[in-house]
Amino acid sequence: MGELKKLVEEGKIRYIGLSEASVDTIKRAHAVHPITCVQMEYSLWTREIEEDVIPLCRYARI
């Protein structure tokens, strides 16, 4: 995250996103730099993210 934050500050990238990250990883990453998006598997068979990841991203505003 530190290196990605530097790239944002240098204007080389605009946003930072995470893929398949746990709640703890999202919180730690956001403490370094705001996270723009989180990509997770979400289907009829994998709905675990409804319990922790979605509420974190939607309501907590980390």
Image (cartoon, grey):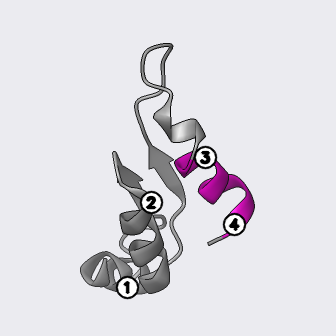
Whole-percent x and y of residue 60?
69, 66
Relative to 16, is 7 on the left or the right? left
Mark 2 sits on what residue?
Answer: 23
Mark 4 and mark 3: span between their CA atoms? 10 Å
Name the residue at the left extreme.
3
Mark 2 and mark 3: span between their CA atoms? 10 Å
| Quarter of the image that includes the C terminus | bottom right
Whole-percent x and y of residue 26?
44, 65
Mark 3 and mark 1: span between their CA atoms? 31 Å
Q: Dot 2, crowdedness within 10 Å: few (<14), some or many (≥20)?
A: some
Whole-percent x and y of residue 17?
42, 57
Decide which of 1, 11 is in the foreground and name it.
1
Q: Mark 4 near mark 3, Cβ–Cβ under 8 Å? A: no
Q: Is residue 54 magenta?
A: yes
> Which label number is shown at residue 54?
3
Is 45 situated above or below 41?
Answer: above
> Which label number is shown at residue 10?
1
Mark 4 and mark 1: span between their CA atoms? 28 Å
Mark 4 sits on what residue?
Answer: 60
Q: Quadrant of residue 36?
A: bottom right
Q: Earlier in the sequence, mark 2 or mark 4?
A: 2
Q: Under tag 3, what secondary structure?
A: helix
Q: Dot 3, crowdedness within 10 Å: few (<14), some or many (≥20)?
A: some
Q: Under tag 4, what secondary structure?
A: helix
Mark 2 and mark 1: span between their CA atoms? 28 Å
Q: Earlier in the sequence, mark 3 or mark 1?
A: 1
